[in-house]
């Protein structure tokens, strides 16, 4: 599983340029975005949290992604190995291994975005339904040990859960990413 994550990390670097995290906070702190990154990553992480995981690197802007939204508390990106087009991940920015570790503003700020994101994914993909899942622990299928929620568009008799063996291409990702962003902008 670690080799798969390393391969995904390497492949993601070639897809698009990284966007920096830190935004407004970076403008307020002496030292700018780098100081904001240090502040956000220095918050007390739960036991067993690996600050070098791929989602932490995406949040820090060190690895590119197909980002569909970002708020103070979370980001949403397209899954690099999607079950189907539009498979999106909602990821809290604050370090946590599973949703059982989430609390306070990170929990409420992230969960407040979930309904809107589900509606946007459904609208963008034309899916009548969606599956929302958070795998909690390796026995449940968790591969990256940073809390994240899968939003998977579902169509009639489309019950597969297996992730794709092939990484999403830019040609596949960009149109659905833009459709989700448009649906979010339209007020989903």
Image (cartoon, helix red, strand yellow):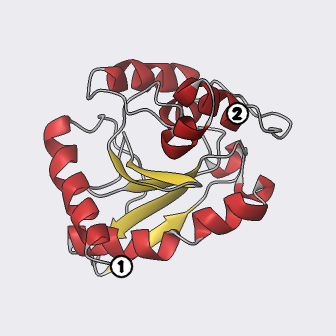
Q: Which residue position is annotated with label 1?
A: 129
- Closer to us: 129 or 54: 54
Instruction: Tell me: 162 left or right of 46.
Output: left
Is disc 2 placed on a helix, strand or loop? helix
- Closer to us: 177 or 133: 177
Q: Which residue position is annotated with label 2?
A: 39
Placement of the N terminus among the 4 image quadrants = top right
For the point 60% across and 38% down, which residue is it? 144
Q: Between disc 1 and disc 2, whose residue precedes?
A: 2
Circle 1 or circle 2, nearest the eye? 2
For the point 36% across and 39% down, which residue is it? 80
Where in the figure is residue 153, as x and y percent of width and height? 34, 67
For the point 71% across and 62% down, which residue is it? 105
- Closer to us: 150 or 72: 72
Instruction: Tell me: 116 left or right of 11.
Output: right
Work out whether 74 lies above or below 142. below
Work out whether 114 lies above or below 99. below
Numbered badge on residue 31: none
- Mark 2 Cα shell of 10 Å, populated few (<14), some (14-19), many (≥20): some
Instruction: Tell me: 173 left or right of 161.
Output: left
- Closer to us: 134 or 139: 134
- Mark 1 Cα shell of 10 Å, populated few (<14), some (14-19), many (≥20): some
In three-dimensional space, the C-alpha distance between marks 1 and 2, rounded to whole angstroms, equals 38 Å
For the point 49% across and 19% down, which residue is it? 6
Where in the figure is residue 37, as x and y percent of width and height? 61, 31
User: Is any atom of residue 1 visible in this view?
Assistant: no
Placement of the C terminus among the 4 image quadrants = bottom left
Residue reaching furthest bottom?
Answer: 128
Where in the figure is residue 59, as x and y percent of width and height? 52, 37
Instruction: Tell me: 143 left or right of 86.
Output: right
Work out whether 13 lies above or below 120. above
Work out whether 162 lies above or below 16. below
């Amino acid at each position: 599983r670690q080799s798969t994550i390393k391969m995904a990390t390497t492949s993601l670097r070639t897809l698009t340029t990284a966007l920096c995290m830190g935004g407004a906070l970076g403008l307020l702190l002496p030292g700018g975005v780098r100081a904001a990154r240090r502040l956000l990553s220095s918050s007390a992480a739960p036991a067993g949290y690996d600050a070098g995981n791929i989602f932490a690197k995406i949040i820090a802007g060190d690895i590119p992604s197909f980002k569909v939204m970002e708020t103070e508390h979370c980001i949403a990106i397209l899954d690099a190995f999607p079950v189907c087009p539009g498979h999106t991940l909602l990821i809290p920015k604050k370090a946590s291994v599973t949703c059982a570790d989430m609390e306070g503003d990170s929990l409420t700020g992230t969960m407040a975005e979930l309904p809107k994101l589900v509606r946007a994914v459904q609208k963008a993909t034309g899916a009548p339904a969606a599956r929302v899942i958070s795998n909690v622990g390796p026995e449940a299928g968790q591969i990256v040990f940073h809390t994240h929620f899968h939003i998977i568009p579902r169509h009639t008799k489309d019950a597969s859960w297996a992730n794709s063996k092939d990484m999403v291409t830019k040609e596949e990702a960009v149109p659905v990413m833009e459709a989700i962003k448009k649906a979010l902008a339209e007020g989903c």
